[in-house]
Amino acid sequence: MKFPQKRISNGIIHVKLYLPDSCKGYYQGTRFDWAGNMPSLQFKEHEYFGQWFTKYSPEIHDAIMGPVEEFSPLHYLETKPGDSFLKIGVGVLSKPDDKPYTFRRPYLVLNHGKWKVKKQPNQVQFIHELNDKEYSYQYKKTVQLIKGRPEMLIDHNLRNTGNLPIETSVYNHNFFVIDNQPIGPGFLVSFPFNLTGGGRGKGELAEIDGNKIVFLRNLKSDETVMFGALEGFIDNKNDYDIRVENHNTGAGVRITCDQPLVELKFWACSTTLCPEPYIKIKVDPGQEFSWKIVYEFYTLAE
């Protein structure tokens, strides 16, 4: 099946994007922002993204690829069963019962909002407009390949057009599948600060070495690493600076943002590794909030 899609290039980087569509779209889950689903990014014959999962359906919550983002749900705890809550980039969802929110659970979408897509040879702009009884917003997300440079900019703007303040967090899951290599000791993830913390798989599958996350062996298909509360960063945008390198093939990428980290997680399985940096968003009615994430692609010196 051919899904709505767009290819963009600046002559250096070549990207394929799936476009949001509530009927024909590749992704129709209720976890991730529908804008920016990226099954392929190629730079100097290296591939950075791709399918990392085995089962696919449009409604599966994590059947998605690339530098995709998830916003925390708004007003979920206060919402009574049968009423609605909001996920930016998805829509207004129904709360079925009094169980805690979990991204693994599919929720009924009551209001998808309206998506518009503006295309240029080197960029795609996604515009999501949602008007509802409690929350309304205009969310713009532009994926742009910078002219003459091996860089991709993801530019965001959220305008609160409703009557209630919007306060949430958003993180980028960064589903890296670099050159389709199995996740193991050939990969290195580093930060500009020394890490503390850990979680599932620490000491057996992966380890923290100063400012780096290293793998101790290749992960098996049923194994995952989950470091859920990494610390060491300060309230400074300079600490949002992440490098992911595949030393088997020589492909690297640096990720920076103009907002400070508020939380940091790391997840990996045998087919993908995912640094997950969070930022905080607060937008009063009539105001807007903007943030930018830059991906700089490079190759390692031999």
Image (cartoon, grey):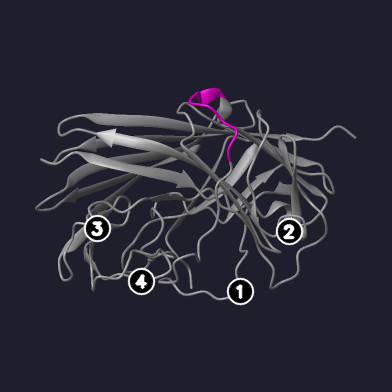
* Residue that numbered label 4 is attached to: 106
Instruction: State the SS at label 3.
Output: loop
Q: Nearer the viewer, mark 3 or mark 2?
A: 3
* Residue that numbered label 1 is attached to: 54
Residue 28: % across, % down: 38, 66
Q: Residues within 10 Å of mark 1 (few under 14, many from 20)?
A: few
Quick check: 49 above or below 94? above
What is the CA distance from the residue labelled 3 to the residue labelled 1? Answer: 33 Å
Instruction: State the SS at label 1.
Output: loop
Q: Is residue 234 magenta?
A: yes
Q: Which mark is residue 265?
A: none
Q: Residue at x 46, y 45 (%)?
A: 171
Residue 10: % across, % down: 58, 35
Return the disc, 3 or 1, that comes first in the chain's sequence: 1
Instruction: State the SS at label 4.
Output: loop
Instruction: State the SS at label 2.
Output: helix
Return the disc, 2 or 1, that comes first in the chain's sequence: 1
